[in-house]
Amino acid sequence: MVNLHGVVNTIRLVAEFPFVLRGIFGARSIKQSGHIHINTVNAVFHFKTCRWSFAARSNNKCESSDSRKERNVFHTHGNVSESMVLSERNKQHLSSLMKEKIIALAGQIHNDVVSWRRKIHANPELAYAEVQTAAFVAEHLRSLGLDVTTEVAKTGVIGLLKCNNSESKCVALRADMDALPILEANAVDYCSKNEGVMHACGHDVHTANLLGVASVLSELRNELSGTFKFIFQPSEEKIPSGADAMIKAGALENPKPACMLGLHVSPEIEVGKIGFHAGKFMASSDEIYITVIGKGGHAAQLHNTVNPLFAASEVLLELQKVSDAKKPVVLNFGKIEGLGATNVVPEKVEIAGTLRCFDEQLRFELHKFIKDEAAKAALRHNAKCEVNILQGYPVLVNDHETTAAAKLAAADILGEEAAIDVPQRMGSEDFAYYTHHVPACFFRLGVGNAAKGITSAIHTPTFNIDEDALKHSVAAMSWMAVKLMQE
């Protein structure tokens, strides 16, 4: 028989870990304060190994047979099963602490993020001319201690945040920086200073948000692992695509991301909510340019002219049949120009439109169909037809696993009601290029607030956001990135 001699009057355990002892010594031993009193054994928990060690001092008393049996059972079985439980609970606790830190940091820098957004909003720059914006981004990333590369695809910026075991995995996050050729009509003190140029699509929000995420994660770098790659790209609004150019310049190499995140503002979604859609989310986009060529002349001389306006009208009516809500496919036109007069038949008519669909094979089949049908329709009027299709963005396909993980993280940090499902969109987005190279999730950030009158659509002169959205987005995107790094 083994005798344990010794008495330990009190073992103290900090209140954060009362659950550790509860499973071993019984709930009756735990006080509300988180302290435990045991008179038989001195127990020490080693966090690195997730194991307990036991010791005692002489006090002329013997351990009872039942106590010894109970202790032996723990030593026999506890090192495996109990350690696994304790390890998992410890991980959950540390994860909860990390989430709380992210929420706190997002709140602390919120005013800074808003000021960055307003600075960028007041100084908008068009595609591939984002010089000041890129310089501002690079300066901030350097101030955080990131490895920064500039002039990627002309004005793009990439920042690398290397944490513990930096080569283990890479998670990429992207923002676009370009503005639109729109005259702003908002009466705000951060209204555009560049007349005729406006951040009417929220790229100022995207950029400021990602700077905020970089700030939060850099603050926690000693507690994180892997490398976070921050990609700030030019020219989302204009072909040639900035995303495609960044990829060709090596943005997805050295290191190659295991997955990627991106977002876009949505004024139709109320602030505080984030929208997700797995699979094919946003349509491909191609620009269609058609020139119908006739024979100009005096409008009274029908026998000496071929009116391209009539031919162009039939071309449009014929191509109108392409649109199909069931597939879905959209072929629509927004411009027709024939520079004639009341008594002048023009030489040609210019038509411009867009093609949107969710099937890449169908997309290129339609390219041929448009050319063939337009030529046939023009020929019926003895006119000729030239079709130029400027290939735009592909279908944006969200990876199912990455999107599910991102949505779960958003619900975890913002609440289940905040992470919502949204339908497919016929709009296009050049983040699609990334989704054809890396498992990715592109989500929608709610920025609308009807109570405050913030309801204007994107690409309008009065578009604006509820800036509270930035507090939600910085916290959510940071937590998504951390959880994806842990996958």
Image (cartoon, rainbow, N blue to C red):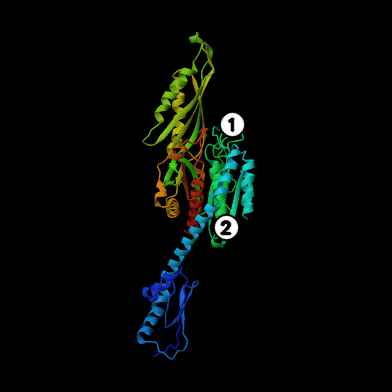
* Amino acid residing under circle 1: Gly
Q: Nearer the viewer, residue 69 or 376?
A: 69
On screen, residue 237 above or below 346? below
Q: Position of residue 214 (x, y in %)?
A: 56, 52
* Amino acid residing under circle 2: Glu
The residue tagged 2 is: 219
On screen, residue 299 above or below 234? above
The residue tagged 1 is: 196
**Tag of residue 387:** none
Could you tell me if residue 234 is visible in this image? no
Q: Residue at x 39, y 87 (%)?
A: 63
Q: Is 372 left, or right, of 124 in this rendering?
A: left
Could you tell me if residue 23 is visible in this image? yes
Q: Position of residue 294 (x, y in %)?
A: 51, 18
Q: Residue at x 64, y 49 (%)?
A: 139
Q: Which callout, 2 or 1, points at the residue further toward the start of the chain?
A: 1
Q: Nearer the viewer, residue 196 or 288?
A: 196
Assess disc 2: are there few (<14), some (14-19) or many (≥20) residues with their C-alpha within 10 Å of its C-alpha: some
